[in-house]
Amino acid sequence: MRTTLTLDGGLLEYVRRRAAEEHRTMTSIIEDALRRERAVTSAPKTRAPVKLPVFGGRGVRPGVNLDNTGELLERMEGRL
């Protein structure tokens, strides 16, 4: 695709010089720079670890089956 860019004079000179040094086109230099920028800005941001609350207790009540989600739901809703 063809387009026109207006670049700062110093930036344009940098791209020209770099293209000449690397025997590449100015287009390929600009494309590579844009790809690197896109990779950096679309990379997932690191965030602080999440602290989960910890509750004390004496374990699971006798007769509660943790593998039976239906029974657990009934117990939590007070139907058992």
Image: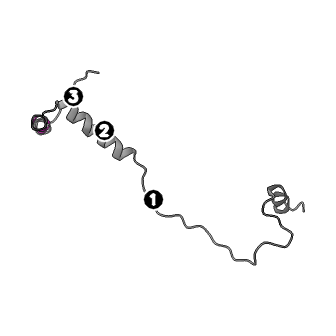
Residue at figure coordinates x 16%, y 32% from the top left: 24
Q: Label 3 is placed on what type of residue?
A: Leu
Kindly indicate whether the residue at mark 3 contacts the one at mark 2 (C-beta within 8 angstroms).
no
| Image mark for residue 35 | 2
Label 1 neighbourhood size at 10 Å, few (<14), some (14-19), many (20+)?
A: few
Q: Place residue 66 in its image quadrant.
A: bottom right
Query: Label 1 belongs to which residue?
Result: 47
| Image mark for residue 12 | none
Disc 2 or 3, which lies upstream in sequence? 3
Disc 1 or 2, which lies upstream in sequence? 2
Q: Label 1 is placed on what type of residue?
A: Arg
Task: Tell me the quarter of the image containing the N terminus.
Answer: top left
- Circle nearer the viewer, 1 or 3: 1
Q: Place residue 9 in its image quadrant.
A: top left
Magenta range is: 14-18
Query: Label 3 belongs to which residue?
Result: 5
Task: Tell me the quarter of the image containing the C terminus.
Answer: bottom right
Left or right of 45? Residue 73 is right
Kindly indicate whether the residue at mark 2 contacts the one at mark 1 (C-beta within 8 angstroms).
no
Mark 3 lies on a secondary structure that is: loop
- Position of 31 relative to 44 (above/below): above
Label 3 neighbourhood size at 10 Å, few (<14), some (14-19), many (20+)?
A: few
- Residue 43: x percent and y percent? 40, 48
Mark 1 lies on a secondary structure that is: loop
